Every structure is written in structure tokens, then in C-alpha cells.
Image (cartoon, rainbow, N blue to C red):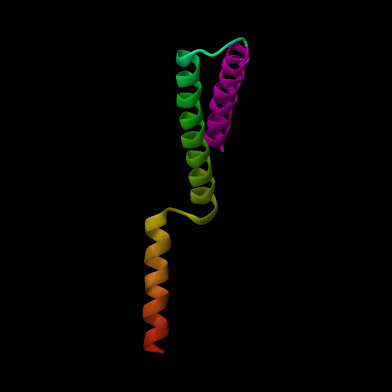
Amino acid sequence: MNIIATIHAEIDEVSERRAELWHQLSDGRNPEVAAQIKALDEKLDALWNEHRQTRANIRFGEREQIVKRARAEERLERAA
């Protein structure tokens, strides 16, 4: 679970930085700040995807193992 806590901490940091940039952007249009916000949004999306994937791996196991079990079950059903 330490991995999830690390991801959450990074999400919090990036979110705080993004909030600061939105505050700067409220003072007036700045293309550099807008680009930084866009980059942070993409980073947050990636972090949330990593968070979901990590939770799924913890709960259900690695993807390869899941597929292997499903194929084995399929073979058993066909044989029966």
C-alpha cells in the first residue's frame, strides 16, 4: 500500500501546483502558465491511471495471470 500512498502524495503536490497556476492565470492571460496547466493536467491523468492500475493489481493480481486463469477456465468449460 506504500505505492498508493506515494502516488497520492504526488497527486496532491501536482494538484496544489495546478491550483497556484490557475490563480496566476486569473490575473490575466499567460500562454506559458496555460501550457504548464495543460502539462500538469496530463500528469494528473497519468497519475490517476497509475493509481487505478496499482489498485487493480493489488486486488486482482497481474494482468497476465488474470488472462492465463481465464483461458484455463475457458478450456475447462469447452472440455466439459
Secondary structure mainly formed by the magenta segment: helix
Q: Is residue 67 above or below residue 24?
A: below
Q: Which residues are magenta?
A: 1-26
Residue at x 42% of width, y 53% of height:
62
Q: Is residue 5 magenta?
A: yes
Residue at x 51% of width, y 22% of height:
37
- For this orientation, the residue located farthest to the bottom is 80
Q: Is residue 62 above or below residue 72?
A: above
List x then y, in percent, for residue 10: 54, 25
Q: Is residue 67 above or below residue 28?
A: below
In the figure, residue 16 lies in which quadrant? top right
Q: Quadrant of the C terminus?
A: bottom left
**Going by the image, does 9 lie left or right of 79?**
right
List x then y, in percent, for residue 63: 41, 55
Residue at x 51% of width, y 31% of height:
44
Q: Is residue 38 magenta?
A: no
